[in-house]
């Protein structure tokens, strides 16, 4: 029975590797446009499961920022659809990085979700017309 643990761990590693390779392949298929878009900053993956609510907040902040740029500029260029992360990271550091109560983070996330919803229709219409929406 001692052989079972290493075998199971080996199989699990193989499966996880296959899943991550497929996820990378799917990601490039998901967005066949704007191939030079900025990658998600390491701070998000470095947060870990315990701070997943913070990582999600950052992702929502980025999406809200993107949709705001598209709607305010009436343009779905790659620079608007996938803008630089730095303004979002600066805002996160200034306003939310030191929040201790996870409910405050949830509240902030809800505000960004509302901002996304308010610009989503226009952003989608513009991006579909310009071939930058999946």
Image (cartoon, rainbow, N blue to C red):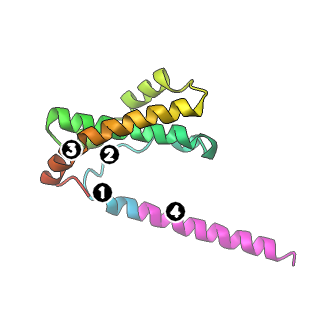
Gap in angstroms between the C-alphas marked 2 and 1: 10 Å
Q: Nearer the viewer, residue 104 or 55?
A: 104
Q: Which mark is residue 117?
A: none
Horizontal and vertical percent position of residue 127: 18, 49
Horizontal and vertical percent position of residue 96: 50, 26
Query: Could you tell which of marks 2 and 1 lies nearer the N-terminus?
Result: 1
Gap in angstroms between the C-alphas marked 1 and 4: 17 Å
- Going 47% across and 32% down the picture, which residue do you hit? 107
Name the residue carrying label 1.
31
Q: Quadrant of the N terminus?
A: bottom right
Q: Quadrant of the C terminus?
A: bottom left
| Front label number (3 vs 1) | 3
Q: Is label 3 in contact with label 1 (beta carbons under 8 Å)? A: no
Q: Which mark is residue 123?
A: 3
Name the residue carrying label 4.
20
> Helix or strand or loop: what does disc 2 sit on?
loop
Name the residue carrying label 2.
37
The part of the chain drawn in magenta is: 1-25
Query: Could you tell which of marks 3 and 2 lies nearer the N-terminus?
Result: 2
């Amino acid at each position: 029975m001692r052989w079972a643990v290493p075998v199971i761990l080996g199989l699990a590693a193989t499966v996880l590797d296959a899943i991550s390779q497929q996820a990378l392949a799917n990601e490039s298929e998901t967005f066949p446009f704007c191939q030079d878009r900025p990658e998600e900053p390491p701070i998000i993956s470095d947060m870990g499961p315990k701070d997943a609510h913070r990582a999600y907040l950052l992702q929502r902040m980025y999406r809200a920022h993107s949709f705001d740029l598209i709607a305010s500029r009436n343009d779905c260029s790659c620079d608007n659809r996938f803008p630089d992360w730095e303004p979002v990271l600066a805002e996160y550091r200034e306003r939310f990085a030191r929040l201790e109560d996870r409910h405050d983070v949830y509240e902030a996330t809800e505000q960004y979700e509302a901002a996304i919803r308010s610009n989503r229709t226009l952003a989608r219409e513009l991006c579909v017309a310009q071939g930058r929406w999946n």
